Image (cartoon, rainbow, N blue to C red):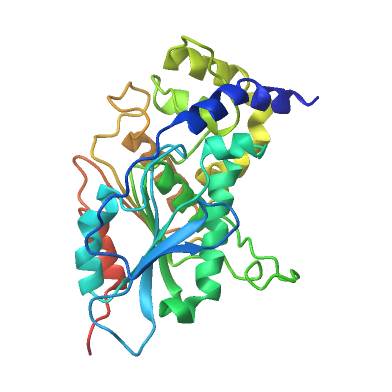
């Protein structure tokens, strides 16, 4: 058996049982209510969309925010605080909002998806293609879509925006023939790499990422021990790391990127929240600028035009009257 697959399989049963044992949370009240929810883009119960039409109806296709929630690819909500805080202003500005639900790491383990992170990321790519194929149903302009998300959802948004087009032009499936290219990404505290070596060099107290590629934890482990195991196994899972790290997909034809962080970058120093540190943003910005790609990075002490994702989206996507 391949070493990476052995790493993947270790401890899978424990994670699956934990996921199955979790209580079903009551349905939350959403305001404003979505125009439509429970729209299936796949066969799994989590492969669903909800969307909101703009407040004012229009005969013209509208720009679209394609929202991917955070939660470490292990939880979260389609209607989390990041989205709901900006939703009214987006809708009032003539922007359609579509929010994606996707399979989690525990679902991937149950289905033997290798590596586990492939499930949430490929789901979001498929959801994007589904939306583009049904652009008339949603009333959107498929060429004016920006991916938005926080944390793991931000990582996925960047991965989509920077990845080469994943359409399959020869597929018999018309949805698979749709482009995955975006107008851009505007994200909140993203992880820009899933490489433990890079994370350790940028932020010495990093501990995140092993769950994306297998099970590196043992009973009673603390996070540094889990991360050390992930780092030690890096070479065995390096092809997966490169495939799913946004920074590895940067090229000169990529769309503009906006990143928001709340802390001050300190490369090579410990950070209070190493999983969401602006060190991630500084390093991706360097790579993007070297490739000639527009990038705006907000962090503590920065001086940039937009102090929030919402402000950036309203500037880029609002329908302005002549």
Q: Left or right: where does residue 91 sit relative to residue 96?
A: left
Q: Residue at x 51, y 35 (%)?
A: 194
Residue 79 horizontal/vertical position (percent): 31, 53
Q: Residue at x 24, y 35 (%)?
A: 263
- In the rendered view of the protein, which quadrant contains the C terminus? bottom left
Q: Residue farthest to the top?
A: 220
Residue 225 horizontal/vertical position (percent): 48, 12
Residue 321 in view in this figure: yes
**Closest to the observer, 265 or 232:** 232
- In the rendered view of the protein, which quadrant contains the N terminus? top right
Residue 256 in view in this figure: no
Q: Residue at x 74, y 23 (%)?
A: 3
Which picture quadrant has residue 178? Answer: bottom right
Q: Residue at x 54, y 48 (%)?
A: 121
Tell me: residue 205, above or below residue 111.
above
Q: Left or right: where does residue 114 sit relative to residue 117?
A: right
Q: Left or right: where does residue 46 sit relative to residue 167?
A: left
- Tally the marks: 0
**Closest to the observer, 2 or 248:** 2
Tell me: residue 320, above or below residue 86.
below
Residue 127 horizontal/vertical position (percent): 52, 61
Tell me: residue 145, above or below residue 122.
below
Residue 41 horizontal/vertical position (percent): 55, 62
Tell me: residue 6, above or below residue 185.
above
């Amino acid at each position: 058996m391949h070493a990476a697959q052995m790493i993947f399989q270790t401890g899978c049963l424990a994670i699956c049982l934990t996921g199955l044992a979790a209580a079903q949370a009551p349905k939350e009240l959403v305001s404003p209510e979505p125009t439509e929810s429970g729209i299936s883009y796949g066969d799994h119960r989590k492969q669903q969309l909800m969307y909101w039409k703009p407040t004012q109806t229009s005969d013209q296709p509208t720009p679209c925010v394609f929202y991917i929630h955070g939660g470490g690819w292990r939880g979260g909500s389609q209607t989390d605080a990041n989205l709901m805080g900006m939703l009214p202003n987006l809708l009032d500005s003539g922007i359609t909002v579509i929010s994606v639900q996707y399979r989690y790491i525990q679902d991937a383990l149950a289905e033997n998806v290798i590596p586990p992170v492939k499930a949430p990321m490929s789901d979001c790519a498929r959801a994007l293609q589904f939306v583009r194929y049904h652009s008339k149903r949603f009333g959107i302009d498929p060429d004016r879509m920006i991916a938005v998300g926080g944390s793991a959802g931000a990582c996925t948004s960047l991965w989509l925006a920077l990845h080469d087009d994943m359409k399959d032009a020869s597929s018999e499936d018309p949805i698979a023939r749709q482009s995955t290219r975006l107008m851009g990404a505007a994200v909140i505290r993203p992880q820009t790499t899933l490489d433990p070596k890079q994370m350790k060099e940028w932020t010495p107290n990093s501990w995140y990422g092993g769950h994306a590629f297998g099970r590196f934890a043992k009973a009673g482990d603390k996070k540094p021990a889990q991360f050390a195991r992930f780092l030690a196994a890096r070479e065995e899972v390096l092809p997966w790391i490169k495939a799913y790290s946004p920074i590895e997909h940067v090229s000169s034809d990529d769309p503009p990127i906006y990143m928001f962080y709340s802390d001050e970058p300190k490369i090579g120093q410990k950070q209070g929240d190493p999983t969401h540190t602006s060190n991630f943003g500084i390093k991706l910005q360097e790579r993007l600028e070297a490739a000639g790609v527009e990038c705006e990075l907000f962090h503590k002490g920065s001086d940039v035009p937009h102090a929030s994702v919402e402000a950036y989206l309203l500037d880029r996507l609002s329908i302005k009257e002549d």
